Image (cartoon, rainbow, N blue to C red):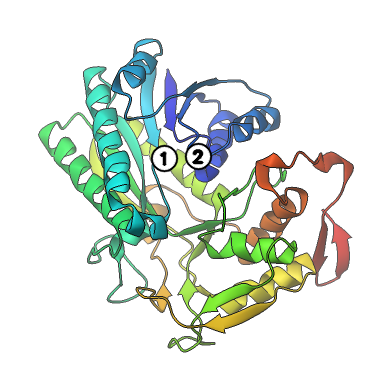
Amino acid sequence: MAVLVTGGAGYIGSHTCIELLNEGYEIIVLDNFTNSNPESLKRVEEITGKIFKTYEVDLLDKESVKEVFETNNIESVLHFAGLKAVGESVSLPLSYYQNNITGTVILCEIMQEYGVKNLVFSSSATVYGTPDKVPIKEDSKLGATNPYGRTKHMIEEILRDVAFSDPSWSIALLRYFNPIGAHVSGRIGEDPNGIPNNLMPYISQVAAGKRQQLQIFGNDYPTKDGTGVRDYIHVVDLAVGHLKALEKVQYTKGIDTFNLGTGIGYSVLEMVETFEQVSGRTVPYSITERRSGDISICYADPNKAREQLNWQATRGIEKMCEDTWRWQYHHPNGYDNKLNINNERTPVQHAAGFFNV
């Protein structure tokens, strides 16, 4: 019996594929490669020493998705596929609603047809919008402030209706916070298209000299240094969280929601400082006006996942920055850069001095 991973070539999906394979799961990847690169899957095979089926299929192509189910013995689905840029969603809301929501509905229709009712859904902390208080718990008020976040919220509601209508479904909704970092091998990592939408890849590209400076949006928030505070989680910790959720849906029924975060908030300037220490590079930055809709503090209460999934994040902020830098240093142009990292070591700054990892 196999686990279908939609969007498995993406940043979080590819790291999760490694953890699945290392735990002995048979996986099948479905991806249209709109915002991912098939090279990541080749490297997953290299890292794990295992091969798996990959289908270049769009979830909106119902007949092709059905063919994947028809020709494979699928038991569970990890659903990562979807458009994910907040800013782009504001400009292209219809594309986001069509792709993310319709694609999920089609997936669920086919799962139901083939009797596959175990699902782990990649949701997001964006469903919370501006929190009333922190840390944010799963029962906090929801109020996404952009189309991307609203697609996640709407899909959650659709899945609740599905689970209510048919008690044989087992669904985990994973709301994760700010994934950063990369696999320790340095072979896979975050490879954003164009200008990065998130803080950490922007910091790492500035450190690598690919971009001139980081823009920090606002330094007058009610935080320790005036810059926004977020909950950053290592992508491998996040991947392990998906395995724990998969284990749960395989032996329980119904639907439940879990925050995946560290429960610790770091400011933008703390992230810059830590990255500079780890990389030994300077990250020039300038302060600009706040962005509309940005909030001051956002971090998770991850206790429910710890208690019910037996999961918690174990990698600290230094490790997150170190692994990000290893990936960035050897792949300044992402997967388009084919530098063999076995032939060169990455300089990483530690308290005891400068050494290679």
Image side of residue 202 versus residue 72, left or right: right
- The answer to whether one can see residue 316 in this image is no
Q: Helix, strand or loop at disc 1? A: loop
Image side of residue 183 versus residue 6, left or right: right
Q: Residues within 10 Å of mark 1 (few under 14, many from 20)?
A: many
Residue placed under numbered mark 2 in the picture: 13
Q: Helix, strand or loop at disc 2? A: helix
Q: Are the residues tagged 1 and 2 within 8 Å (C-beta)?
A: yes
Residue placed under numbered mark 1 in the picture: 80
Query: As displayed, is residue 270 above or below residue 343?
Result: below
Query: As displayed, is residue 313 above or below residue 163?
Result: below
- The answer to whether one can see residue 296 in this image is yes
Taking the spot 51% from the left edge, 44% from the top edge, the residue there is 12
Q: Residues within 10 Å of mark 2 (few under 14, many from 20)?
A: many
Figure label count: 2
Taking depth in this image into account, of 308 and 52 the one nearest to the observer is 52
Instruction: Give the amino acid at mark 1.
Output: Phe
Taking the spot 18% from the left edge, 37% from the top edge, the residue there is 163
Instruction: Give the amino acid at mark 2.
Output: Gly
Q: Quadrant of the N terminus?
A: top left
Residue 345 position, x and y percent, is 86, 50
Q: Quadrant of residue 83?
A: top left
Residue 80 position, x and y percent, is 41, 40
Query: As displayed, is residue 21 above or below residue 356?
Result: above
Residue 79 position, x and y percent, is 38, 37
Residue 130 position, x and y percent, is 30, 72
In three-dimensional space, the C-alpha distance between marks 1 and 2, rounded to whole angstroms, equals: 6 Å
Taking depth in this image into account, of 217 and 356 the one nearest to the observer is 217
Taking the spot 85% from the left edge, 71% from the top edge, the residue there is 352
